[in-house]
Amino acid sequence: MSKNREIEAKVALDQASYEAIVAAYPVKSDFKQSNYYFDTPDKQLKEDHSALRIRCFQDRAEETIKVPVKKLQETYHESLEINDDLTLPEAEDLLKKGRPSLTGNVGQYLLEHYPDKASQLTLFSWSKTRRILLDGPKGCELTLDQTSYPDGYQDWEMEIENDSPAAIKEALAEIKTRFALPVKSANNQSKIARASQHAK
């Protein structure tokens, strides 16, 4: 289990910009993951600006809830992530049932904050992502995602993550200039929102 505060700029890209950025910086890791999203029928987590997912990798899985926190800065996306490790068989069993785990620290949070609704949480959409982690400028890690959704829609995205909002701002400015990105916002829509829009 882990808890961590996440500060990141989320930037939508076109495919050409995605490929140019991937080619420009040292690759730390390159892997695939599947993301499965849960909410109540009345979308209570969405209403509360929270997000619950199970994410499956090649040899492991994890359950995560992202919850709002009092922001330390006003420019970039910020949330608290609570994570529990799962084995792949555990995750596959939950996904067959279409239900999240209500054990561990994620389950504890759900039962404490949604005592009457935790049992109503069900799987409502998914996405599949190829994720490439890069050593970016200004000491920032770049996450480059190519993601597909149930209806066949595909998109590309960059996340710039760092504990320092100033470093994120400098890295984003450098990348926008270097790659002539037509970026208007550093807070792109979340994957769970896009998966909801592109669910079958």
Image: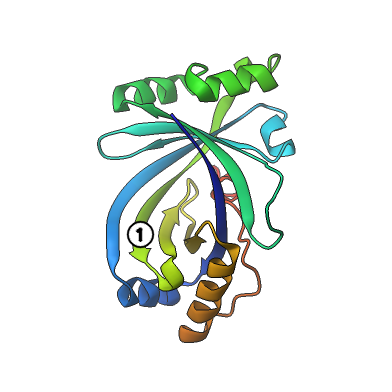
Residue 41: x, y in percent? 68, 27
Q: Residue drawn 43% across and 55% down?
A: 147
Q: Nearer the viewer, residue 138 or 55?
A: 138
Q: Does the image show residue 14?
A: yes
Residue 57: x, y in percent? 32, 40
For the N terminus, give its image quadrant.
Answer: top left
For the C terminus, give its image quadrant.
Answer: top right
> Which residue has dot 1 on it?
133
Three-letter amino acid code at disc 1? Answer: Leu
Residue 108: x, y in percent? 57, 18
Q: Nearer the viewer, residue 15 or 60?
A: 60
Residues packed near mark 1 inside 10 Å, few (<14), some (14 to 19) or many (20 plus)? many
Q: Residue drawn 69% across and 58% down?
A: 73
Q: How is the image coloured?
A: rainbow
User: For residue 168, what is the image quadrant?
Assistant: bottom right
User: For residue 47, what is the image quadrant?
Assistant: top right
Q: Residue drawn 46% across and 53% down?
A: 152
Name the side, left or right, on which 153 lies relative to 189.
left
User: For residue 137, what is the image quadrant?
Assistant: bottom left
Q: Secondary structure at mark 1?
A: strand
Name the side, left or right, on which 139 lies relative to 74.
left
Residue 188 vertical position relative to residue 173 in the rendered view, above or below: above
